[in-house]
Image: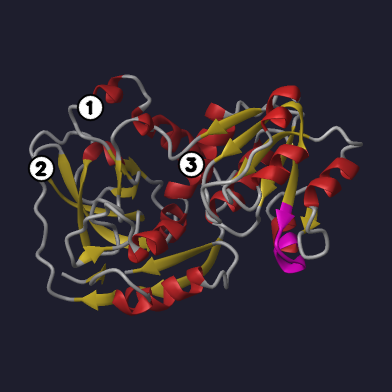
Amino acid sequence: MKAAVLTGHGGAEVVELVNDLPVPEPGAGEARVRIKAAALNRLDLWVRAGWRGLALDFPHVICADGAGIVDAVGAGVARFVPGDRVCINPSIVPPDDPALQTGLENQTRISILGEHHSGTAAELVVLPQRNLLKMPTEFDFGAAAAVGLAGVTAWHSLITRGGLQPGETALIVGAGGGVNSLSIQIAKLAGAQVFVVGSNAEKCAQAETIGADITINREREPQWSRAVARLTGRRGVDVVVDNVGAASLEQSMRACRIGGRILVVGGTSGYRFDMNVAQLFSRHLALIGSTMGPHQDYQRFMQQVFANRIQAVIGERLPLREARYAQTLLENNAIFGKVVLEL
């Protein structure tokens, strides 16, 4: 079986295409999916680099997101049959976890495809049936694969955790990444006025094409929180989505109105920063951490995608053999949107 794998931790040179992985067989409650498209996330770069305590069995199949056709099913699988077109929720939850009964399974001991669990960039992948969702007959596999991890993260943070309401203002810190490009569209769909901080004029222009109402070019206005204050009559925005972390959280707090919410959904620039606690309590700010999302949020988000109310933003489609180049594109921030590998 062909797959794009890591042969170890390191630079892009450790990403290889192999042809000899064993074909997996579905067990009870599992289905085997013939993958048609897989998509990269920044998570793939972190897994490739490795971190203390991360123990992988190499070769390790990359990618969290995917879509394809059910190829075989194990005992007890009733919701899917061979031939079904499906997309994949990338969060794996142990079948005996009590959180599966509460709808908060993203707040438990999950593993993510491509991280601690073997990923989707392979010809055949075996998954629990709860991780699959049927797709409309003509829906594009690449588009379905491109939005999984980022989409459920963005939906859960803005809608479920953040409670974004029609008429509110939302600021998305960053324009081109998967979570950001989908957060722009979700906020617009929710009826908010959408502000975006982009790293350059090109990314600001691209953000406007997917729903941003007001963009701030960080190259021209590095103190972008001041621009937010000016543009909102010194009020600030109701909600900030920040997946940058250390480099941006101080400004995110300044950009938020008194009583506003800051949704921390990542830390691409680092995880630690010095916080002015007086600013937090005196301005009644709420710092809300959020990552991934339960399966019900994945379903709700994907229904909006299938209805074409939210579009997958794809910067590049490449064959599986170009997986190493795909990671280089992602690492160099060379594209706007997601990198999709097609099989």
Dot 2 amino acid type: Gly
SS for callout 3? helix
Assess whether residue 73 is covered by the magenta stretch.
Answer: no
Magenta range: 197-204
CB of mark 3 within 8 Å of CB of mark 1?
no
Query: Would you name the residue on which mark 3 appears?
Result: 153
Q: Nearer the viewer, mark 3 or mark 2?
A: 3
Dot 1 amino acid type: Asp
Q: CA distance from mark 3 to mark 1?
A: 21 Å
Q: Position of residue 82 (x, y in %)?
A: 19, 49
Rendered image quadrant of residue 35: bottom left
Query: Would you name the residue on which mark 1 appears?
Result: 97
Left or right of residue 29: residue 289: right
Residue 164 vs residue 333, the one in the foreground: 333
Query: Would you name the residue on which mark 2 appears?
Result: 74
Left or right of residue 208: residue 291: left
Q: Position of residue 323 (x, y in %)?
A: 36, 74
Residue at 61 percent of width and 26 percent of height: 163
